[in-house]
Amino acid sequence: MSEAGWSVMDASATGKRCVYSLVAVLVGLSLFSAVFFGYFTGYSQSRVEIGGLKNQLSEIQAQLQSFQHASNSTVEGLNNSVSAAVESLRVQLSKLQADVAALQVKLSASDQTYTNVTQMQVELKQLQAEISQLQADMDSLQRQISSIQTHVQQLQTTPPVVYQNVYENITYLLGMNVSLSQLYEQVKVSVVMIQGLIRQYDVFGRSYLVQIQGSGFVYNHSGHMVILTNNHVVNGAFNITVTFSNGNRYAASVRGADASTDFAVLVSNASQGEYTPLEVISSSSLKVGDPVIVVGSPYGLEGSLSEGIISALNRTITTDQYTITNVIQTTAPLNPGNSGGPLMNYRGQVVGITTAIVSDSQG
């Protein structure tokens, strides 16, 4: 081939390399643009421009193929055409590079905006969770308020049970808002009727048996169930029995007694299931005017209830040969058979033992 031919081929090869390099650059830019243009409105226009460039490259490749077979007369024209096409591609490449730079700026701004939006979404979820918790707390408070309102309405429509003291015209509120009948049902199972025999003598020295009768109550003494009563009820008695409120009767015996305090302790062969002990508290908590009840077996009438008030404290009485101090005086009616029974407050706590009545009656 001629020297001019070699020069043409060198120029042609150089043009091909330039064109291929531009093609590679353009393809990379087109892929990069395709990724980011989807998020912006300039995507479609860039795709059109890239498509145009591809068409131009196809035309240049076709020209190059024909260039290899062209005569010397057409080499210069083809060379000029390739140079013009390359220059046009360079101009368009510069424009695309500027567009890409602008898109990068916008993308950075959008990334920051997206980060802010994401943070706002996280905070919004936290606020929604707090709102839900507050709503749950409000619902719970509303339910509590409704319950309190219902309870108040019930209290308004059903006044508490009260006890009217006929002696002093003083109104007392029963412990735990129970009526006297409810209190009686709670304590009667702990009160027993005590019976036995004593030997007495007539004026001629002849002996005969007399039945004694009194009351007592169950007490838990360090884990041992005992029955407390008056000494004068069981003093000198034998064949002693205790009868519970359910009618069950058991043999009993005196475990200990103190005549000076008129106090005695009995034990029986009843099963543990029979015993329901009462709570005993100090009488020092009593005040004159406090309401009290007495449960016992006056005249053999088992499980009788009477009520009254504390009329005096720290009294002293004398029975037979003994003087008893620190006696509680009450207006609650006491009759023969009540002796040894519990004197209780309106909570069912034992504050004393009924010992005697200062009158013509005995027991």
Image: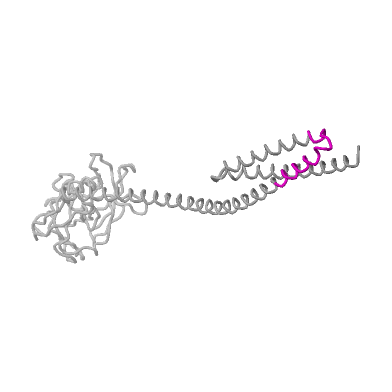
Magenta highlight: main SS: helix
> Which part of the image, by quadrant, shows the N terminus?
top right
- Asked if the stretch drawn in magenta spans residue 68, the answer is yes
Q: Is residue 275 left or right of residue 329?
A: right
Q: Is residue 235 visible?
A: no
Q: Is residue 23 left or right of residue 128?
A: right
- Image height check: is 51 above or below 307? above
- Asked if the stretch drawn in magenta spans residue 74, the answer is yes
Q: Is residue 90 visible?
A: yes
Give the residues in magenta.
66-87
User: What kind of colouring is applied to the model shown?
Assistant: one colour
Q: Residue at x 30, y 45 (%)?
A: 275
Q: Residue at x 78, y 33 (%)?
A: 66
Q: Is residue 180 left or right of residue 140?
A: left
Considering depth in this image, is 128 or 185 the residue closer to the camera? 128
Quadrant position of residue 185: top left
- Where residue 331 sits: x, y (%)? 12, 58
